Image: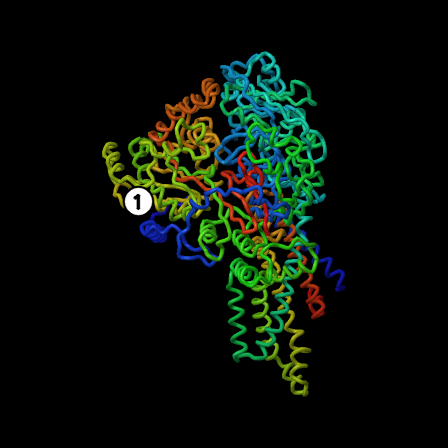
């Protein structure tokens, strides 16, 4: 751990801090990139956020889209197993889902002709399910968690342990070899039969949807696809709320019913299977749905199919000749009100995935035109493409993303000052969010004024996101030393308050941001803050953050932890991941056990409350109560939100970025519900 | 000693070396905090402690480290290098698909290094103390000092972006096609530059030493031309030390491939090693380390054989 404060170790930090502060003071928001010519003009990331529209009459059909991903190869062709976002970027063009979303987080029925939450009822999980639980032999116990060998396609529904037996496991009365009552997938159907469930979703598929292999996609494919997630690395995510799925009219029918364990306001999104597989792939063992292991290539119902691949070198996707939407017709989608001439599928014939993990190579490849588009580029290069006359024909397109940087503070009363709410509030007031975005991110980020980003705003408020940013409880974008001083005086602590601001050692941009915070804090005279970088992200996470009593040790040292995370289009992801005790000692609530915050129940109510499910305005109102409580308590404070940006060469027309990079090929190339289509004009 | 017996003896000596490499690598990877499970679900907000435990048990990471090593070694001896947990194929599949790229890049680097180093080293030795010698030594120092990632990026910026002579992206052509071999010139130069500079310095020093020996004076006294003295007598004897260093530099080229393959997006083992290290994929790290270990051992074996061919007295020392 780095805890040295000697002159030698602090001098470089001071210099770096002064440089950063100097940049902030002079308002330098952009510098030239390393390979381009650059110019003296400032970049304008706002311009990159402007959407380009396509006139359908201008569309040119055909061509090969050279698209670079920032990895050396596909991590895993088996999407049930893959946990890498870049894999999903590629294969979201191959697999279609039941619903799709636009950049604002609105959902549209896609392969689903209809998708409705048809029932929600008050039920307590797991208590109301105990009579459906069966006894299984415990295979092992570790850290108070029992594991089982349940056989193929079965799993314990997360949280489905009998409360009495779980208590017995935790106090050591039940161990390996003993029997324990749990609710598994095998018993979940019986509970549903008796009407015990929280939410019911009914889905009807469009008829005639075909996989690339010609098989018709029916209810059996949808229900069977969950099996491939059992035992996978994504199991926990898929079954976060899912209880049971069935095909009421048989596998050959088009109707699917999905059930959640509790009333769940996110059920209309979270219950659907992540990926829908053809029948011949349903029984393929994990990781064997990968051509590099001698298995088949992925086959979906998406607009593109896998044409060829060479490990680490190329992956070619070609437009399928039996795309279902062309059969169904846009006019049969309830959301369609666009022009007749709008294509019913993507117009680009081929997507050539280029594997280019090195930033410099991706930039050079964009500049020499050997690729058409790339993402995950450093802020300096984005600014270069945005500003330079040499690249004036290039387009940088960016969207507010679902990634965020936050600072977590321990509340434990252990001799430090951070258990004092006014001290935490004073820290929150001293974060120079705008300078952080301007100097470190060169404008390619958004200062956090709310504890969730713009893409999650839909269910998060009855008003607009802009209104929330102006609320009196919103995070300030500029430091407020007077406000901070007043809070510190109210707290009655001695000044300067010694603080340790920790982050991971393998992220220099993150360290620069903390240096800017420290600069503001120290210059106010209220704090004496120090940056510490104990280790790279994973070791730090394991050794320090999720260690037992980490809250106590951090509180004793007046230490905070700053790290990044990404959630989705739902505000629950932001509130739950970093504030709720269900994330305690996992990811990413390190210091706040159950009972820390009064608003824990409000977080649950906003997602699992029956009223929230029945009417979205109830949900929005609940969140409106929650946000001020979160910003006032300051268990965490958000610093900035990320942007997802893509640079496209002049050959690419109509391309617009998306808040989540996993949709850079499926949304950005063809999303008629949003009038989105891209084409090539060389 | 016969050449065949000499080679067999060298191969036998390399077995404990490779075993030691695998033990050290296995131990070092396990000493690092965390494991592949933390990579898979470490920062997934939806992952529960139960998911972590289930995965760790499923992957066999809950067993004692020596059991894990013995299991790995037993499987590896049968050609099974184990699963790559965060990726699809097994480690062996990756090695099989990626090694030709790395070997080809290494050969390009070697060829470039030898083509530059030997003539320049001879020239510098012959012109010792003169301007040509000074210039070549300065260039060599520059070549050793320059970081290969920077050199690679500069070559891309100049030859691909500014001059448009090369493509910044790997051509999608067969490995041994004309387009691909042409494209490999830039990464080959990048990876071979440091080795070339090192070899040139050794070549020069060795030549200078040999040229001061009595047999050279005798050869000159016999009236042989300077060209014959240098190329027929001095060069052959000087090559022994070059071969020695060249074998050592194989390790440098292998290490350089990690950076150069990443900069140029070349799908070889070096780039794969980065992915494996980041993901803490121990089976893949071990397989690549073992493969490169074998390559380095083979390079040293070739060097030993060349010694024996260049100077038969060496064979008798074993």
Give B226 or A563, whichever is nearer the viewer.
Answer: A563
Left or right relative to A238: residue A209: right
Q: Is residue B248 visible?
A: no
Instruction: Place residue A74 in its image quadrant.
Output: top right
Snapshot colouring: rainbow
Instruction: Place residue B305 in its image quadrant.
Output: bottom right
Instruction: Place residue A329 in its image quadrant.
Output: top right
Left or right relative to A121: residue B13: right
Give A383 or A467, whichever is nearer the viewer.
Answer: A467
Residue A219 placement (x, y as % from top left): 66, 24
Residue B154 placement (x, y as % from top left): 52, 61
Residue A96, above or below B208: above
Residue tagged by mark 1? Answer: A520
> How dense is the environment of label 1, judged by Cα within 10 Å: few (below 14), some, or many (20 and up)?
many
Residue at mark 1: chain: A
Residue A376 placement (x, y as % from top left): 51, 46
Residue B236, above or below A12: below
Disc tally is: 1
Residue at 51% across, 68% down: B141
Quadrant for the N terminus of chain A in the image: top left
Q: Is residue A350 visible?
A: yes
Residue A108, above or below A676: above
Residue at 55% across, 15% down: A129
Q: Secondary structure at mark 1?
A: helix
Residue at 61% across, 56% down: B254
Residue A414 placement (x, y as % from top left): 33, 31
Give B183 or A252, whichever is nearer the viewer.
Answer: A252
């Amino acid at each position: 751990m780095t805890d040295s404060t000697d002159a030698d170790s602090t001098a470089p930090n001071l210099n770096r801090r002064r440089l950063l502060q100097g940049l902030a003071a002079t308002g330098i928001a952009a510098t030239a990139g390393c390979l381009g010519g650059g110019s003296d003009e400032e970049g304008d990331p706002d311009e990159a956020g402007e959407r380009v529209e396509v006139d359908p009459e201008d569309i040119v059909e055909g061509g090969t889209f050279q698209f670079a991903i920032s990895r050396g190869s596909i991590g895993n062709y088996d999407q049930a197993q893959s946990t890498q976002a870049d894999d999903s970027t590629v294969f979201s063009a191959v697999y279609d889902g039941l619903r799709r979303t636009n950049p604002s987080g609105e959902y549209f029925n896609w392969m689903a002709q209809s998708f409705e939450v048809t029932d929600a009822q008050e039920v307590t999980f797991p208590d109301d399910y105990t009579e459906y639980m069966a006894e299984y032999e415990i295979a092992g116990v570790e850290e108070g968690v029992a594991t089982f060998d349940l056989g193929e396609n079965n799993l314990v529904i997360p949280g489905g342990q009998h409360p009495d037996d779980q208590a017995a496991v935790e106090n050591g009365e039940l161990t390996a070899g003993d029997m324990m009552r749990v609710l598994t997938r095998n018993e979940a159907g019986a509970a549903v039969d008796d009407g015990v469930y929280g939410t019911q979703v009914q889905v009807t598929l469009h008829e005639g949807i075909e996989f690339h292999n010609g098989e018709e996609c029916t209810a059996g494919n949808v229900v069977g696809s969950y099996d491939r997630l059992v035992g996978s690395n994504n199991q926990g995510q898929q079954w976060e709320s899912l209880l049971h799925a069935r095909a009421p009219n048989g596998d050959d029918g088009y109707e699917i019913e999905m059930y959640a364990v509790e009333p769940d306001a996110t059920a209309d999104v979270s219950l659907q299977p992540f990926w829908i597989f053809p029948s011949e792939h349903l029984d393929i063992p994990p990781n064997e749905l990968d051509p590099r292991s001698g298995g088949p290539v992925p086959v979906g119902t998406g607009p593109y199919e896998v044409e060829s691949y060479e490990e680490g070198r190329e992956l070619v996707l070609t437009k399928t000749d039996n795309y279902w939407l062309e059969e169904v017709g846009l006019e049969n989608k309830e959301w369609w009100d666009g022009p007749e001439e709008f294509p019913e599928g993507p117009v680009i014939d081929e997507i050539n995935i280029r594997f280019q993990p090195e930033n410099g190579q991706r930039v050079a490849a964009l500049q020499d035109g050997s690729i058409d588009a790339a993402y995950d580029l450093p802020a300096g290069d984005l600014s270069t493409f945005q500003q330079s006359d040499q690249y004036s024909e290039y387009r940088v397109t960016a969207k507010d993303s679902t990634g965020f940087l936050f600072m977590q503070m321990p509340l434990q009363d252990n001799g430090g000052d951070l258990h004092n709410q006014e001290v935490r509030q004073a820290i929150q007031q001293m974060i120079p969010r705008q300078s952080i975005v301007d100097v470190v991110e060169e404008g390619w980020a958004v200062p956090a004024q709310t504890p969730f980003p713009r893409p999650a705003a839909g269910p998060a408020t009855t008003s607009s996101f802009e209104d929330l940013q102006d609320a009196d409880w919103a995070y300030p974008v500029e430091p407020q030393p007077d406000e901070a001083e007043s809070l510190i005086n109210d707290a009655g602590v001695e000044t300067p308050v010694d603080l340790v601001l920790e982050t991971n050692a393998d992220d220099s941009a993150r360290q620069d941001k903390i240096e800017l915070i420290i600069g503001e804090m120290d210059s106010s005279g209220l704090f004496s803050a120090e940056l510490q970088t104990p280790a790279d992200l994973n070791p730090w996470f394991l050794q320090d953050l999720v260690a037992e009593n980490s809250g106590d040790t951090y509180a004793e040292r007046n230490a905070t932890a700053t790290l990044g995370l990404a959630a989705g289009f739902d505000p629950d992801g932001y509130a739950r991941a970093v504030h709720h005790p269900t994330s305690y000692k996992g990811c990413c609530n390190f210091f706040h056990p159950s009972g820390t915050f009064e608003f824990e129940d409000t977080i649950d109510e906003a997602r699992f409350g029956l009223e929230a499910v029945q009417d979205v305005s109830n949900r929005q109102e609940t969140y409106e109560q929650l946000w001020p409580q979160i910003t006032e308590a300051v268990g965490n404070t958000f610093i900035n939100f990320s942007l997802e940006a893509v640079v496209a060469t002049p050959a690419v027309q109509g391309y617009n970025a998306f808040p989540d990079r996993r949709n850079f090929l499926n949304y950005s190339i063809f999303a008629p519900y949003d009038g989105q289509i891209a084409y090539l004009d060389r | 000693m016969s050449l065949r017996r000499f080679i067999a003896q060298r191969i036998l000596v390399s077995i404990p070396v490779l075993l030691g490499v695998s033990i050290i690598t296995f131990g070092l990877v396990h000493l690092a905090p965390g494991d592949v499970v933390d990579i898979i679900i470490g920062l997934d907000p939806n992952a529960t402690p139960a998911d972590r435990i289930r995965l760790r048990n499923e992957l066999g990471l809950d067993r004692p480290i020596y059991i894990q090593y013995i299991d790995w070694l037993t499987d590896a001896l049968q050609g099974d290098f184990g699963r790559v947990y965060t990726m699809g194929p097994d480690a062996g599949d990756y090695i099989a698909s990626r090694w030709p790229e790395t070997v080809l890049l290494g050969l390009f680097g070697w060829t470039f290094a030898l083509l530059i180093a030997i003539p320049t080293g001879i020239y510098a030795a012959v012109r010792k103390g003169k301007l040509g010698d000074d210039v070549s030594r300065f260039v060599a120092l520059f070549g050793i000092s320059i970081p290969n990632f920077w050199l690679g990026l500069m070559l891309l910026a100049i030859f691909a972006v500014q001059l448009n002579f090369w493509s910044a992206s790997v051509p999608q052509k067969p490995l041994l096609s004309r387009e691909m071999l042409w494209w490999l010139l830039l990464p080959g130069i990048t990876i071979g530059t440091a080795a070339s500079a090192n070899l040139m310095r050794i070549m020069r020093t060795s030549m200078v030493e040999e040229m001061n020996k009595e047999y050279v004076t005798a050869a000159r006294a016999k009236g042989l031309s300077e060209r014959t003295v240098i190329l027929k007598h001095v060069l052959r004897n000087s090559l022994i030390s070059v071969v020695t260093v060249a074998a050592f530099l194989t390790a440098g080229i292998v290490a350089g491939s990690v950076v150069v393959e990443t900069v140029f997006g070349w799908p070889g083992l070096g780039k794969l090693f980065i992915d494996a290290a980041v993901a803490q994929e121990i089976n893949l790290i071990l397989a690549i380390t073992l493969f490169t270990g074998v390559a380095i051992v083979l390079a040293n074996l070739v060097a030993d054989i060349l010694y024996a061919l260049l100077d038969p007295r060496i064979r008798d020392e074993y």
